[in-house]
């Protein structure tokens, strides 16, 4: 993603050149465009560096990749959405809410099942469906990215495909707790602390 500041863009470019761990995309990184970023992640994971599973996560989330991989080995690799699931949720109709959705955007009073945005995993077949749907202009570009993925997976299910929802309450949406797989709202300092605890103590314990 691009930044509004040219100086920040140059610093990101230098970091990307040094470590090779940044994929640049031709649009500014605004909250309302996160859904496009997710489509780009699916494109990257299916066409550029093909993967069996793709994980979307926030930059303030600390993820235990070892536990994710261990859980995926037990999961059905088809039609998978794995994370902290929300099976019964409704659109925010309060106009002051960050997550406000008007009846025009989503007229139904409930959402399909979706996984909370700090981190979730989809299988390759779902990612390919997302990429193809975007190319063919068949996807609804819903601005709440995590709910959008749930909507797309519902479309995948409606097309006659099998879908598997894997709920894992160790994906903590609002901070950290013992035995976490994902801890959200972690600063760089806390992330270093969590990493050091895993290395020294081999335990998933929080730093605060």
Image (cartoon, helix red, strand yellow):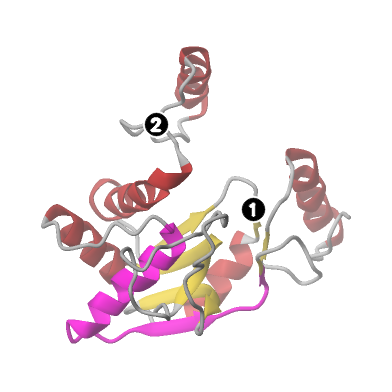
Earlier-in-chain disc, 1 versus 2: 2
Question: Do the numbered discs 1 and 2 sit on residues whose CB atoms are within 8 Å?
Answer: no
Q: Secondary structure at mark 2?
A: loop
Q: Secondary structure at mark 1?
A: loop
Looking at the image, residue 43 sits to the left or right of residue 179; the answer is left
* Residue positioned 80% across, 63% down in the render: 202
- Image location (x, y in percent) of residue 12: 50, 23
Looking at the image, residue 5 sits to the left or right of residue 1; the answer is right
Compared to 126, does 31 lie above or below? above
Nearer to the camera, 120 or 103: 103
Nearer to the camera, 35 or 186: 35
Quadrant position of residue 13:
top left
Residue designated by label 2: 28
Rate crowding at label 2 as few (under 14), some (14 to 19) or many (20 or more) other CA atoms within 10 Å.
few
Residue 71 appears in the figure: yes
The N terminus: image quadrant:
top left
* Residue positioned 41% across, 80% down in the render: 109
Q: Is residue 160 magenta?
A: yes
Over which residues does the magenta segment extend?
144-171
Residue at the left extreme? 136
Looking at the image, residue 118 sits to the left or right of residue 82; the answer is right
Q: Nearer the viewer, mark 1 or mark 2?
A: 2
The C terminus: image quadrant:
bottom right
- Image location (x, y in percent) of residue 15: 52, 23
* Residue positioned 76% across, 50% down in the render: 195
Quadrant position of residue 177:
bottom right
* Residue positioned 78% across, 57% down in the render: 198
Residue 61: numbered disc: 1
- Image location (x, y in percent) of residue 23: 39, 35
């Amino acid at each position: 993603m691009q930044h509004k500041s040219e100086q920040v863009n140059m610093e990101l470019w230098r970091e990307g050149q040094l470590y090779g761990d940044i994929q640049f995309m031709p649009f500014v990184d605004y909250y309302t465009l996160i859904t496009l970023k997710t489509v780009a992640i699916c494109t990257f994971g299916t066409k550029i560096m093909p993967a069996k599973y793709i994980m979307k996560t926030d930059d303030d989330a600390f993820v235990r990749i070892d536990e994710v991989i261990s859980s995926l080995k037990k999961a059905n690799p088809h039609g998978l959405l794995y994370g902290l699931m929300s099976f019964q949720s409704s659109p925010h109709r309060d106009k002051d809410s960050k997550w406000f959705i008007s009846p025009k955007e989503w007229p139904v009073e409930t959402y399909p099942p979706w996984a909370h945005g700090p981190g979730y995993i989809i299988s390759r077949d779902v990612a390919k469906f997302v990429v193809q749907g975007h190319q063919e202009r068949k996807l609804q570009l819903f601005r709440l990215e995590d709910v959008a993925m749930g909507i797309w997976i519902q479309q995948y299910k409606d097309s006659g495909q099998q879908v598997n929802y894997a709920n894992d309450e160790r994906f903590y949406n609002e901070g950290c707790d013992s035995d976490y797989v994902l801890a959200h709202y972690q600063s760089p300092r806390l992330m270093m602390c969590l990493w050091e605890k895993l290395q020294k103590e081999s335990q998933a314990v929080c730093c605060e």
